[in-house]
């Protein structure tokens, strides 16, 4: 198979759709995180899917930005970079939650409990190092990057504008939910997840339409 710009664009669109669906799916019925549940197979599987989600999201937002790089402008560039940092940070913290915390839950349960508390808006009892700062930067990158990239995509008027708006305002919704208990905190995946699905499908369809139109233009020439 020949790899073309159109092929890569459609692949990025499909990756964004998959990332959005996974992001929503792993939050449905998510158990409360504590020292006991963090070692369960269910939580490990959910966290592994989150790692896949972050990877697919990085490919998806790269395609969204690069497919219309000139129209997205400086705002789009900054938004893409900042949001990418957010997803890389999500990948890193999820990796720790998926494979490091379960391994030390039996030997150091208090530390695991403190890390989980810091990650779910609780108050850790012991020292968890720079984790609170990392989580704050992660939240800023996730919210700020989504806002800027959403504005850029809306202004470019290439992919679905409703999804671009949802990506932008999803950060504000997430900011409000982030200070609520864990059960509400899980809802922050929905606005961003739906936006990623809409943007990804729109990008995939736009690339497909472009491909189907090109032969007709060549014949007319």
Image (spheres, helix red, strand yellow):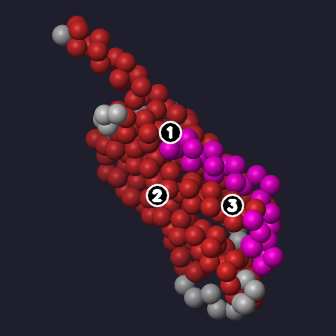
Which residue corresponds to mark 3? 45
Name the image quarter holding residue 113.
bottom right
Is residue 74 one of those drawn in magenta?
no
Judge by depth and name the residue closer to the eye, 149 or 7.
7
Asked whether, in this view, residue 174 is left or right of residue 145, the answer is right
Mark 1 vs mark 3: give the one in front.
3
Judge by depth and name the residue closer to the eye, 44 or 75.
44
Q: Earlier in the sequence, mark 2 or mark 1?
A: 1
Mark 3 vs mark 2: give the one in front.
3
Secondary structure beneath dot 3 equals helix
Q: Residue at x 50, y 51 (%)?
A: 56
Mark 2 vs mark 1: give the one in front.
1
Q: Residue 83 — which label? A: 2
Q: Residue at x 52, y 34 (%)?
A: 201
Q: How many marks?
A: 3
Q: Mark 3 and mark 2: span between their CA atoms?
A: 25 Å
Secondary structure beneath dot 1 equals helix
Quarter of the image containing the C terminus? top left
Q: Earlier in the sequence, mark 1 or mark 3?
A: 1
Judge by depth and name the residue closer to the eye, 42 or 201.
42
Kindly check if marks 3 and 2 are in contact, taking CB atoms under 8 A apart as contact.
no
Asked whether, in this view, residue 48 is left or right of residue 16, the answer is right
Identify the magenta region. Answer: 14-41
Judge by depth and name the residue closer to the eye, 178 or 53.
53
Kindly check if marks 2 and 1 are in contact, taking CB atoms under 8 A apart as contact.
no
The relative height of residue 183 versus residue 68 in the rendered view (above or below) is below
């Amino acid at each position: 198979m020949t790899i073309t710009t159109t092929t890569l664009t459609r692949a990025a669109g499909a990756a964004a759709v998959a990332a959005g669906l996974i992001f929503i799916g792993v939050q449905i019925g998510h158990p409360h995180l504590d020292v006991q549940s963090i070692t369960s197979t269910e939580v490990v599987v959910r966290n592994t899917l989150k790692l896949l989600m972050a990877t697919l999201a990085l490919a998806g937002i790269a395609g969204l930005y690069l497919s219309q790089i000139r129209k997205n402008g400086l705002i789009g560039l900054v938004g893409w970079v900042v949001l990418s940092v957010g997803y890389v940070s999500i990948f890193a913290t999820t990796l720790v939650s998926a494979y490091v915390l379960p391994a030390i839950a039996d030997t150091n349960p208090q530390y695991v409990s403190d890390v989980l508390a810091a990650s779910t808006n609780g108050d850790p009892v012991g020292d968890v190092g720079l984790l609170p700062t990392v989580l704050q930067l992660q939240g800023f990158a996730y919210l700020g990057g989504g806002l800027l990239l959403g504005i850029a995509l809306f202004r470019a008027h290439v992919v679905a504008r409703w999804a671009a708006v949802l990506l932008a305002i999803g950060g504000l919704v997430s900011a409000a939910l982030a200070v609520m208990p864990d059960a509400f905190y899980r809802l922050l995946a929905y606005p961003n997840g739906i936006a990623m699905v809409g943007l990804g499908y729109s990008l995939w369809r736009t690339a497909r339409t472009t491909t189907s139109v090109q032969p007709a233009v060549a014949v007319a020439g």
